Amino acid sequence: ASLSEYDMILYECSTRNRTEESLQLFKTILDYTWFRKSSIILFLNKKDLFREKIMTSDIVDFFPEYDGPTQNEIYGRNFLASLYKEQYLCSKRSDIDSRPFFIHFTCATDTDNIKKIFTAIKDTIMHVHMEELNLA
């Protein structure tokens, strides 16, 4: 999902915010039975563009529930991440649903950042599988 689209609308629907659409799509994916027991790894991408945009486009203008400081990259991206986390928490239907959920802030053009994130994901997946096999 793109961090930098919080203030943009869809091409095909001039009244629909892109982040709201992304949240709805994320919720739909979470509710698919195919992913019922899958770990969820969310990449909030374009953190570089978000860093620039947050200086001139206030999140509260598009998400009135945002109560953090203006022009603050960390608060802003954590707020957007919390919207996705809320969708994840709402999708949990029972105590049995204990699938792990991870959020990573990314910049696809920053190869060092991507390498670190994929290493962390690989380690997490290995750890989860080792726990399932009682090897951790």
Image (tube, grey):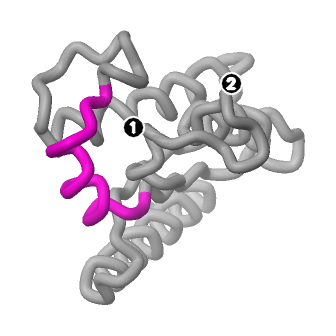
Say which element carries label 1.
Answer: helix
Q: Quadrant of residue 45?
A: bottom left
- Mark 1 — residue? 81
- Mark 2 — residue? 91
Q: Quadrant of the C terminus?
A: bottom left
Count of numbered circles in the view:
2
Three-letter amino acid code at the position of disc 1: Ala
Q: How far apart, in angstroms, are the residues tagged by discs 2 and 1?
A: 16 Å
Is 24 on the left-hand or right-hand side of 33?
A: left
Direction bottom: furthest residue: 111
Q: Locate residue 27, reporting x and y percent.
A: 70, 33
**As drawn, 11 above or below 23:** below
The numbered mark, 2 or 1, whose residue comes first in the sequence reads 1
Direction right: furthest residue: 33
Say which element carries label 2.
Answer: helix
Q: Which residues are magenta?
A: 45-59
